[in-house]
Image (cartoon, helix red, strand yellow):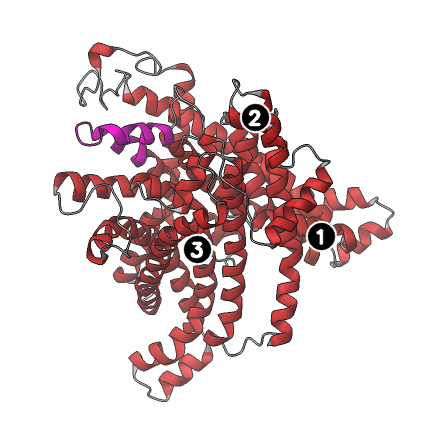
Amino acid sequence: MLGYLARRLLTIVPTLFLVAVAVFALVRLIPGDPVQVMLGDAADPAQADQMRQQLGLDRPIPVQFLYWLEQLASGDLGHSITNNLPVLPLILERFQVSAVIVLIAVALAACIAVPAGLIAAWRQNSVLDLAVVGSATLLLSIPSFWLGLLLLLLFGLKLKWLPVIGYVPFSENFSQAAWFMVLPIVTLVMVEVGVLTRMARAASIEVLRLEYVTHARAKGVPEWRVLARHVLPNAFAPTWTLIGLTLGHLLGGIAVIETVFTLPGLGRLLVDSIFARDYPVVQGCLLFIAVVYVVVNLIVDLCYPLFDPRVALS
Amino acid sequence: MKLRANTFVGGVLIALLAGTAITATFWTPFDPLRTSLRERLKPPSALHWLGTDEFGRDVLSRIMAGATTSVIVALVTVVLAVSVGVLVGGVSGYRRGWTDRIIMAFTDALLAFPGILLALGVMIVVGASRFGIVLALGLAYMPSVARVVRGTVLSIREKEYIEASRVLGNSELYTLARHVLPNAIAPVAVLATSMFGWVLLAESALSFLGLGVPPPAPTWGNMLAASRSYMENASWLGIAPGLCIALTLLGINLLGDALRDRLDPRMEQG
């Protein structure tokens, strides 16, 4: 287990290094002088020089890169150009908002999708199965940002049950914060349920065909016990991998949901920084999300044996 | 029976999309860019079937023109991602060794970014434009093609007919192009179909964020983004573009499922 962990950590090192190179190269690839772009055309030359020095842009590229890596290693992602705040705390603060929504949404989606997929597979080709697969495919096809807008229109503007826009941190007022989170979370749950249900169903169908299921039934094990004890644990493993991928994809795509519901999350920070040409923040966000994505997938892999003891981590 | 109904519905939806996209290149009811302040935010009527937007532009015409943009962007992106991906993955799987290791390290690094995030990064560099989106999304989706092709090639290259081609004195390139790649097409076809849907969705999302096709050119994504400010009084502005995206994705998903069942019953995706 420890050996496996060490090897897995070693394999993500080159990946993370290339990610760092890509993020570093990004700002250097932007046409024109980045300082000019960030400060605007009317920039004072002295101020531009100072900024160039501050960002280390007057040194050779490889030196800049090593210097940047050294700063990264000490957790320093630089300072925002718009408000001069350090980038890392800014990212962490916004990340909390996104992480809460994404984690709750994925957990809820899995709680709905896994049983739904299992039952659909159990009654394969029945009306129930058709209904489950049909609704899953339908949900899969609805873009999250449109669904969000529709829910906002219905529950926020027409029925006035839920607040339309705004955000209150959980630390300030829990119940009010939860109230603002309902629509974003429901939107993400509906979108993700589609993908996960189809996966859970496909995995369950495979398992239901196996001989030990027939054997368990032949022994007279009650049907609910066959499903809960023999099918569910074995069908959950592939779904679990997909849940990991979903977490990462949601983090990447959260910007659209945060835009629909005007939430101050990480995705919104990234998009706002792109528009403001605040490149240190852009670099920080891209790097942070990529690292989280890699780490989440590592954790998912490490948890695999919990659901499928046959998988030895070696 | 169920399969046929699915394929039929999917086919009809995609045929509608293609028909609309082609028609809009030479005819739309109104000029999709013509503004008319007197006809701002008019609800659907006999003249303007889907109403007019905040500049008095005909929504139906814009939806049709948006279909053309989306289809062209998605098609070109898929062609780019598939051709580069097949080449990269094919070489990687066929040559193996260091070529393979280096290429795979790069694709892994690209896959370490969630697709849309990578596209965002590229858009920063190349700027918001049609060309930028194609490049950004092509780069984002190329690695998954490369991975699939590499895996297939790795298994095909061990087959006896490949050995036979080599013994006959055919060059490596010829063997790869003539015997290896054609056999890797089935999984790529399935992937390319789904990819068309992903690219269309990603393009809409980028345009929705204001980082895609720049206005005034209509796309479903930027029409949705613009509708947000008028949601309370002009909800029709937000319904039509979203419905178009959803129906297109539904068509692609249904066709993709049918294609997968047909070409490779074992391959199951989420």
Q: Residue at x 33, y 59 (%)?
A: A104
Please identify the quarter of the rendering in which residue B250 is found. Answer: top left
Q: In the image, which is nearer the foreground, mark 3 or mark 1?
A: 3
Location of residue B173 in the rendering, given as x and y in whole percent from the top left corner: 79, 42
- The residue type indicated by label 2 comes to Gln
Q: Chain of mark 3?
A: A
- Of residues A262 and B39, the one drawn nearer to the viewer in this rendering: A262
Query: What SS does tag 3 mark?
Result: helix
Q: Chain of mark 1?
A: B
Is residue B254 depicted above or below A228 in this figure?
Answer: above
Q: Quadrant of the C terminus of chain B?
A: bottom left
Badge nearest the viewer, 2 or 3: 2
Depth check, mark 1 against mark 2: the one in front is: 2
Query: Was residue B240 drawn as part of the magenta stretch in this picture?
Result: yes
Query: How many discs mark residues in the rendered view?
Result: 3
Q: Main secondary structure of the magenta part?
A: helix
Measuring from the top left, give residue A11's x and y in whole percent.
65, 61
Q: Which residue is mark 2?
A: A47
Q: Amino acid at mark 1?
A: Gly
Q: According to the image, label 1 marks what residue? A: B93
| 3D distance between C-alphas at marks 2 and 3 | 44 Å
B183 vs B31, left or right, is: right
Asked if marks 2 and 3 touch (Cβ < 8 Å), the reply is no
* Residue B261 in the image, given as x and y percentages of width and height: 47, 54
Give me the C-alpha separation between circle 1 and circle 2: 52 Å
SS for callout 1: helix
Using the image, tell me which numbered label, if any, was put on residue A246: 3
Above or below, comparing residue A56 to residue A228 in the picture = above
Q: Tell me, yes or no, whether the two marked residues, 3 and 1, touch with CB atoms within 8 Å.
A: no
